Amino acid sequence: MAVIITILCAFVLTLILGRFLIPALHALKAGQSIREIGPKWHNSKQGTPTMGGLMFIAAALLCVVIGGWTAMVSGTYEHLMVLGFSLVFGAIGFIDDFVKVHLKRNLGLTALQKLILQLAAALAYLALLRWNGNLSYELYIPFANVSFAIPAVVYMLFAVFVIVGCVNAVNLTDGIDGLASGVTIPVMVFFTVTAYTWGSKTLALFPAALVGGLVGFLCYNFHPAKVFMGDTGSLFLGGAVCGMAFALDMPLILILVGLIYIIEALSDIIQVTYFKLTHGKRIFRMAPIHHHFEMGGWSEIKIFTVFTGVTILMCILAWLGVMNRF
């Protein structure tokens, strides 16, 4: 019941916060700058308020802290660790958005600055999970229902790579109206159900809050979007996705639930690499891959529907792969 209440409260709070935040962002002239190399028809989105992710971040924060207060008083902090980790990435995104909007630098923070901040956040989170007993140096294999130990150093290198890669893959997915929200909702439903059925009912509050918050955000972000989540929202979501995977000690599940994120990231890497190697040739019409489909005539709504649908199917498959773990 607490999970359902959390979803509903986050949904309502996000809707209410949106009514105040969007006009405030307009007043602050916090409009999105559209990159010249993007699809030409995206130019009409120039000036749409960004940093809208603040509304579902604030809703999730309130719901998780209030809903998990009793557990926190009794000494359970697992929900706060994932929330805190996500907030750190949200803060990195906020700085990036601030640089873009206030200093008028369209690319925001440099790649090196982002990487250093993300690596530091990942290492701190992994150390905290290990200290709290939530992280083993074992890899759980879905479907096979077995785990195997690997050396601590190898595991940490793997984990940092996965976290930084996952966060940036979610960020790349936020390229058309509603896409990052639509794809992440079923992922958060999966983590909510998994955490709850595995007995981590307090931990389940965090993804539950994001389910409600993202559904509420879609009311403003679905095509045609009235507001964008910005890097503030997308990096927060990236932190939430990989944060939950490691909190539940099953990072390999990201291959299934995060398939769309992976495809988005790989399409970008392949495009850039091939472009450099062939001195200007391209594999995709445009990368990341959602732009490839846009250039092929797919509407933003069709891309949203297909990508979200694929994620729902992959999350169902992922649940079948882990349901017998405990």
Image: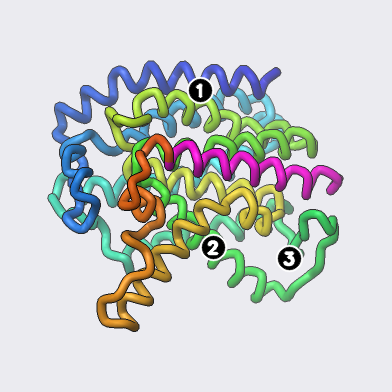
Viewer-side label of 1, 3: 1
Asked whether 249 or 64 is in front, the reply is 249
Q: Residues within 10 Å of mark 1 (few under 14, many from 20)?
A: many
| Near-viewer residue (16 or 145) | 145
In the picture of the structure, the residue carrying the numbered disc 1 is: 10
Q: CA distance from mark 2 to mark 1?
A: 29 Å
Please name the amino acid that badge 2 sits on.
Leu
Residue occupying the point 62% across, 57% down:
255
* Residue at which label 2 appears: 123
Asked if residue 248 lies left or right of residue 79, the reply is right
User: What segment carries the magenta color?
Assistant: 303-326
Residue 8 placement, left or right of 152 = left
For the residue labelled by badge 1, is the local secondary structure a helix, a strand or a loop? helix
In the image, what residue occupies the spot 84% across and 48% down?
Answer: 325
Residue 54 in view in this figure: yes
Nearer to us: label 2 or label 1: 1
Q: Residue at x 42, y 49 (%)?
A: 173
State the mark number for residue 131: none
- Residue 30 drawn at (x, y percent): 19, 37
Q: Residue at x 48, y 49 (%)?
A: 238
**Residue 178 x, y percent position in the rendering:** 40, 36
The disc, 2 or 3, on the residue closer to the chain's N-terminal end is 2
Q: Disc 3 residue type?
A: Tyr
Label 2 residue SS: helix
Whole-percent x and y of residue 313?
64, 42
Question: What is the CA distance from the residue labelled 2 to the residue labelled 3?
Answer: 14 Å
In magenta stretch: residue 308: yes
Main secondary structure along the magenta-highlighted residues: helix
Q: In the image, is residue 118 above or below residue 46?
A: below
| Residue bearing the label numbered 3 | 137
Indicate the position of residue 220 as horizontal and vertical percent values. Answer: 35, 25
Q: CA distance from mark 1 to mark 3?
A: 34 Å
